[in-house]
Amino acid sequence: MPNKKGDSIWEGVDIEKTESYNQVMKIDSSRSFAKWMIGLFVVFLILLFMPWTQNINAKGKVNSLKPEQRPQSIQATIPGRIEKWYVQEGQLVKKGDPIVEVSEVKDEYFDPKLIERTSMQAKAKEASVSSYSSKADALTRQVQALEANRLLNLEQARNKVKQGKLKVQSDSINYIASITEADNILKQFDRLKTMYTQGVRSLVDLERLEIRVRETAAKRLSAENKWLEAKNELLNARIEINSIQSDYDDKIAKSRSERFSTLASQYDAEADVTKMNSEFSKFSVRAENRTIRAQQDCYITKVFIPGIGEVVKSGDELLSILPAVYELAVELFIKPMDLPLVKIGSKARFLFDGWPALVFSGWPQLTFGTFAGKVVAIDNIANKNGEFRLLIAQDADDEPWPKALRPGSGANGILLLGTVPVYFEIWRQLNGFPPDFYSDTPVGDKNFKDKPPIKSLK
């Protein structure tokens, strides 16, 4: 018979006697609590002996690994007026593409044919150098010819001296012979005169011999005269040698002086040519610098001096660019007390802005959404904030960094150090000791080993 309104289905039923009620409602709460506490304690003990990777947390930003791949600005190489822009912000330009064109504002560069005329002046000076060179060569040949003629004339004069010496010797012999002959004839005349006085010889013989005496005396005088003339000729030959030497020395010195003067003019002209060629190169490079071109493939990020007609000075920033190809790295800044714990090749994990992650700093193998890196450079001096900069590149052995990551993005870094038990890390944190570094354990090794610390803590 159905229950009336207000009647309970449990009326007349003893629930406490049912088996299901006893299994559900009658629980020994004290025993259950003890089991739970024992279980939690066991888990806590297990956790205390689990390996824990010590780490250093630091903040930084994404940058490029190589200097030429970092964001940079383009400056005006010459002062001028902006005439034309070839690009716009956000545009990709290739290496060598024009970016902006400027015109000259200095009056010394207003001549539209300045480069052509400078080139003509340089060519004219080069022709002058060639003329001076030809003249110097001609004077060199002239000096050589004079030296050759001097040798020939001196040889000829020396031959005359030799001839003069021989003639003097010959004439001196003739002169001595004439003296001897004159003395002999005179003695004969004296003997014949004595004999004439005695009447032995005739007057005719005496007169005939007297004539011979006079003839030999004249012959002696003639021989003496020839001998003196030969001596004079020898002296003149010797004087002629000195005259030839002096005359040719004067001519050669004059030619050499003209040659040196020509060479000096040639060197001056060559200096002018070098100067003009330098001016020509400078004007050519300046003309090329009027059009500023991209030095690498890059994106135009921001234009600092927009518009047409703006006057800029040399070194003014015109725009900023971001290289199209770059290798990312992270700049982290750590405290001086953490610097001795880091070395080249140390491992790190990163949380990039915009990429969600689940982080267990002490268990990097359980971390999700972080990216691996490796220290490639450490600054030797601290920055103005007293921190040291680390440059960390991607770890080629791990997952690559996101392609959408850009220089300038924020990054939280976790530098991985040695591996210690959890109880030791808790004890270290409570005492405020710095992390320990284990040289025998690979930095950031995922194969954790529970080893006692090498360093003793006092």
Image (cartoon, rainbow, N blue to C red):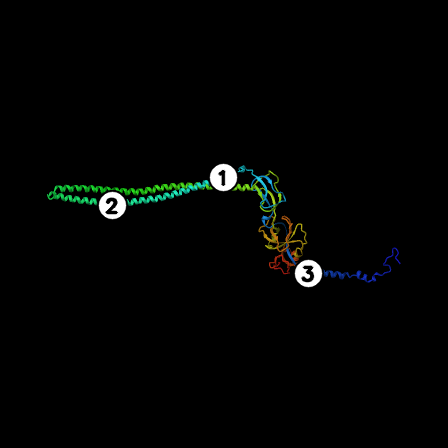
Does residue 41 lie above or below 293 as drawn?
Answer: below
Q: Residues within 10 Å of mark 3 (few under 14, many from 20)?
A: few
* Residue 7 x %, y %: 87, 56
The quadrant holding residue 261 is: top left
Q: Quick check: marks 2 and 1 in contact, CB under 8 Å?
A: no
Tell me the element at label 2.
helix
Q: Quadrant of the C terminus?
A: bottom right
**Residue nearer the viewer, 418 or 434:** 418
Task: Describe residue 236's horizontal placement relative to residue 205 as left or right.
Answer: right
* Residue 376 x %, y %: 59, 53
Residue under the point 19% across and 45% down: 181
Q: Which mark is residue 46?
A: 3
Tell me the element at label 3.
helix
Does residue 228 lie above or below 425 as drawn?
Answer: above
Q: Quadrant of the N terminus?
A: bottom right
Q: Quick check: marks 2 and 3 in contact, CB under 8 Å?
A: no
Q: Marks 2 and 3, Cα distance to the nearest angstrom?
A: 140 Å
The quadrant holding residue 107 is: top right
In this view, the mark in front (2 or 3):
2
Residue under the point 51% across and 41% down: 280
Q: Amino acid at mark 3?
A: Ile
Q: Marks 1 and 3, Cα distance to the nearest angstrom?
A: 91 Å
Q: Residues within 10 Å of mark 2 (few under 14, many from 20)?
A: some
Q: Which mark is residue 120?
A: 1
Task: Describe residue 173's horizontal placement relative to residue 126 as left or right.
Answer: left
Q: Which mark is residue 170?
A: 2
Question: Reading the chain from its start, which is encountered first: label 2 or label 3?
Answer: 3
* Residue 277 x %, y %: 50, 42
Q: Amino acid at mark 1?
A: Met
